[in-house]
Image (spheres, rainbow, N blue to C red):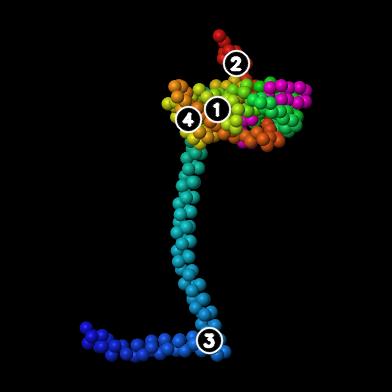
Amino acid sequence: MVKRVYDIIVLFKEYFLLAFYIVLALLLLARNETDQVRAIRSHLLAVAGTLQDVVGVVPNYFTLREENHILREQNLTLTDEINRLREARLENIRLYRLLNLKDRPSLPYLSAHVVGATSQSLRNTITIDRGRKDGVLLNMPVVTADGLAGKVSTISGDYAVVQLLLHKDVRVSARVERSRVNGIIRWTGGRSLQFANVPTSFDVQRGDVIITSEFSSIFPAGIRIGVVSGKRAVPGALFQAVDVTPAVDFERLEEVFVALHTPDSSRVAIDHRP
């Protein structure tokens, strides 16, 4: 073993001597503080920094290449999803035409400013600067950009009073957007609404979006009401207690929109037939 090491040293003695002299020269340069040595040291550091930057570009290039590949895949996935949604919409339109079903008409909206607010225990209302002269009628839905706010309860020529969802007399036929479970939205106090008349076995989950349903003759279907914030079983009861956080911030209402929606009189007559 020793002989083999000796043979290697003899064979490559010139390289070993060169390495020794380089190390020795570097040590002398490091310990020498003359102006010339400092200048050489500064230039060597600059060269080393430049080489490091050049070498650093290589792994950065591969990282960017991998990120670009991932973004291309995500873009392809999103494009495919958009195309499928577009096809589903077109197919839905074709099916409606084949079945001769009525399309849901888009509602005209009338903007209004909130000029007053009243909070009396379980009766919260606002007053808006639109009234009968503007085409506002009783029970017309009132919404914001976030969702359902309430309904018109009293009107005059130039103003109207709106019962908010935070009013004990307001009831809204609603459903879970995801599972299509139906129930009634009501308010009995506090910051949350209640999604009532929902059996304990029905599929309602935290985070579910609640919207208006077709069962109401006052509110059009599909208006966002809020999000399920919690649920709990009531001992001995057939229905579960479901809390809903309203989509609308009722403490910051400044501008609302009156949906110029009037229920079909023939449908109302049938709904109220004994």
Q: CA distance from mark 3 to mark 4?
A: 77 Å
Foreground of the two, 86 or 138: 138
Q: Which quarter shows the N terminus?
A: bottom left
- The tag earlier along the polypeptide, 1 or 4, is 1
Mark toward the viewer: 1 or 3: 1
- The tag earlier along the polypeptide, 3 or 4, is 3
Q: Which amino acid type is shown beneath numbered disc 4? A: Arg
Foreground of the two, 93 or 72: 72
Q: CA distance from mark 2 to mark 4?
A: 35 Å
SS class, disc 4: strand
Q: Answer whether labels 3 and 2 touch (C-beta < 8 Å).
A: no
Q: Which residue is mark 1?
A: 194
The vertical placement of 200 against 70, above or below, is: above
SS class, disc 3: helix
Q: CA distance from mark 3 to mark 2?
A: 96 Å
Name the side, left or right, on which 201 lies relative to 86.
left
Q: Which residue is mark 3?
A: 40
Q: Which amino acid type is shown beneath numbered disc 2? A: Val
Q: Which amino acid type is shown beneath numbered disc 1? A: Gln
Mark toward the viewer: 3 or 2: 3
Mark toward the viewer: 2 or 1: 1
Residue at 74% over, 30% down: 116
Q: Position of residue 90 (x, y in %)?
A: 51, 35
Q: Position of residue 64 (x, y in %)?
A: 48, 61
Q: CA distance from mark 1 to mark 4?
A: 12 Å
Residue at 47% over, 23% down: 239
- The tag earlier along the polypeptide, 1 or 3, is 3
Name the side, left or right, on which 90 lies relative to 265.
left
Mark toward the viewer: 3 or 4: 4
